[in-house]
């Protein structure tokens, strides 16, 4: 039975060659779950059937790999992530695209991720370091094996959670299902597959790296936004409250009135550049997350 299902899944992956790896992973996971559950139901109601006959019947109901692949390709066209970049040319000028960052939801989604990544980075780093330490300390006891298995299952679950965050804020298609169903396997086999699943180890590396990345993102964009807002608010600060616009050490400087519009314009342009930089870092981080969290 496993060979038949494995063959079906392999053919399905070939039919979906060129599709997004996250879509392929979800399609294979859905197909495997449907086939295995269908076989169990048929054998429960008709125990006299051979497993191969039950598999053939379920495959006929589910559809051929080519049909399933075509259905997923059609569905994916209408289920793009909310902030996914459009492949269609928008016809706008370079100036409109540049200044349009102020109303571009993708820029704000990426910017929010840059801030939020500090919190997730701290949590992920703490979870991995604590989980590895506790699991290794318990391995001298028989209870260490289930503790390690639970920890690695939690890493798989957190991988899906991070994928939802990345997809929702950065517009990068990420898996919505675990890579495969393991309910049919024995406990020890399931543990071995967990321990040898390189995607779990890649996820742990990603979670550790997320902390320094989160610190970098948060520091960079908080500083950049503060600088831009300071330039925009300088007239209020200087003429409304009588405070100097610039303080360097023990020296304070007031901006001349004729130069104030330039300072405000620089602040606006700085915020625009910050939003474009957030989009750039969002694309780079999204590509990094896909490489580390998605099974290719």
Image: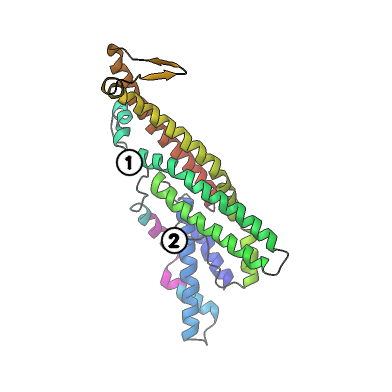
Task: Choose the circle earlier in sequence order: 1 or 2.
Answer: 2
Q: In this view, does 279 lie to the left or right of 191?
A: left
Q: Is residue 194 left or right of residue 288?
A: right
The residue segment tinted magenta is 59-73
Q: How crowded is mark 1: few (under 14 residues within 10 Å), some or many (20 or more)?
A: some
Residue 67 on the magenta segment: yes
Query: Is 185 placed above or below 84 here?
Result: below
Disc 2 marks which residue? 66
- Asked where in the image residue 105 lies, by quadrant, the reply is top left
Point out residue 287 in the picture as x, y percentages from the top left corner. 49, 43
- Asked where in the image residue 50 lies, by quadrant, the reply is bottom right
User: Considering depth in this image, is 48 or 171 the residue closer to the camera?
Assistant: 171
Query: Is 249 placed above or below 160 here?
Result: above
Q: Which residue is drawn at 46% across and 86% down?
A: 45
Where disc 2 sits, the SS reads helix
Q: Residue at x 58, y 64 (%)?
A: 150
- Location of the N terminus by quadrant is bottom right
Q: Residue at x 65, y 64 (%)?
A: 192
Q: Are marks 1 and 2 in contact (CB under 8 Å)?
A: no
Where disc 1 sits, the SS reads helix
The tag on residue 193 is: none
The tag on residue 105 is: 1
């Amino acid at each position: 039975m496993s060979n038949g299902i494995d063959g079906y899944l392999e053919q399905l992956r070939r039919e979906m060659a060129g599709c997004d790896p996250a879509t392929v992973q979800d399609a294979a996971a859905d197909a495997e779950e449907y086939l295995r559950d269908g076989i169990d139901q048929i054998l429960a109601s008709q125990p006299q059937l051979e497993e191969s006959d039950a598999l053939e019947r379920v495959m006929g109901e589910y559809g051929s790999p080519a049909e399933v692949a075509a259905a997923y390709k059609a569905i994916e066209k209408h289920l793009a992530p909310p902030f996914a970049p459009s492949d269609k040319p928008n016809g706008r000028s370079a100036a409109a695209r540049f200044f349009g960052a102020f109303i571009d939801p993708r820029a704000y989604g990426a910017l929010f991720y840059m801030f939020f990544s500090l919190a997730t980075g701290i949590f992920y780093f703490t979870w991995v370091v604590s989980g590895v330490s506790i699991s290794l300390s318990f391995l001298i006891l028989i209870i260490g094996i289930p503790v390690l298995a639970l920890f690695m299952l939690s890493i798989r679950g957190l991988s899906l959670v991070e994928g939802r965050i990345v997809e929702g804020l950065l517009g990068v298609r990420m898996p919505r299902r675990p890579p495969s169903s393991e309910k049919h396997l024995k406990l020890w086999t399931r543990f071995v597959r967990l321990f040898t699943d390189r995607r779990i180890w890649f996820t742990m590396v990603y979670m550790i790296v997320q902390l320094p990345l989160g610190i970098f993102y948060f520091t960079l964009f908080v500083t950049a936004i503060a600088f831009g807002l300071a330039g925009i608010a300088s007239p209020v600060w200087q003429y409304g409250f009588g405070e100097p616009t610039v303080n360097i050490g023990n020296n304070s400087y007031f901006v001349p009135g004729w130069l104030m519009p330039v300072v405000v314009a620089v602040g606006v342009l700085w915020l625009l550049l910050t939003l474009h930089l957030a989009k750039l870092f969002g694309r780079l981080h999204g590509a990094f997350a896909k490489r580390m969290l998605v099974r290719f």
